[in-house]
Image (cartoon, rainbow, N blue to C red):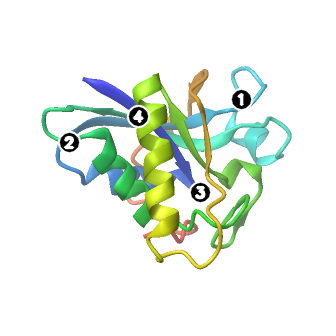
Amino acid sequence: MEKATFAAGCFWGVEANFRRVKGVIATAVGYTGGNFEDPTYEDVCTGRTGHAEAVDILFDPAVVGYAQLLEVFWNIHDPTTANRQGPDIGTQYRSAIFYHDQEQKNTAIASKERAQNSGKFKRPIVTEIVPASAFYRAEEYHQQYFEKGGMGGCRIH
């Protein structure tokens, strides 16, 4: 099993999309990329923690490759908007790929270049590609939010 971590706006929709991918074994939503230990949702919403809402993904590389997960990532959000997805605004909603090793970094960079050159996006992609750091699991009510019947917010498809 391998791990992937992505931020693409509201983590509810991001998680829901990745949970549909064959080969994804488990997901968890949480906070990463910042400088504040053990943040709560309320802490992250202040915009002062530096954390992004993100999804940690455990996947079976024999079934789905990291490059395929990146394709899902590019297709479920607008990577050209800095610190914003739909109505959600703030650094916690930024687009970011948190790589876990050099191979993931290289694959992410190449994937970003392909996405930029594809003609799909009319503006430059602003997605950060940065090393994975501490991942703080979000509160339980955020986990698999839509599967629990959560409603509202989050315009990601």
Q: Nearer the viewer, residue 49 or 122?
A: 122
In space, the residues marked 2 and 1 are separated at their CA atoms by 31 Å
For the C terminus, which image quadrant?
bottom left
Amino acid type of the residue that numbered disc 3 sits on in the rendered structure: Gly
Packing grade of label 1 (10 A; few <14, some 14-19, many >=20) is many
The mark closer to the camera, 2 or 3, is 2
Residue marked by disc 3:
9
**Disc 2: CA contacts within 10 A as few (<14), some (14-19) or many (>=20):** some
Category of crowding for the residue at label 4, using alpha-carbon neighbours closer than 10 angstroms: few (below 14), some (14–19), many (at least 20):
many
Read off the residue under disc 2: 64
Residue, disc 1 = 39
Sequence-earlier tag: 2 or 3? 3
Q: Are marks 4 and 2 in contact (CB under 8 Å)?
A: no
Q: Earlier in the sequence, mark 3 or mark 4?
A: 4
Q: Tell us which disc is closer to us: 1 or 3.
A: 3
Mark with earlier residue (2, 1) = 1
Identified at 69% across, 33% down, the residue is 40
Left or right of 156 on screen, residue 67: left
| Residue 98: percent from left, percent from top | 54, 35
Image quadrant where residue 138 sits: top right
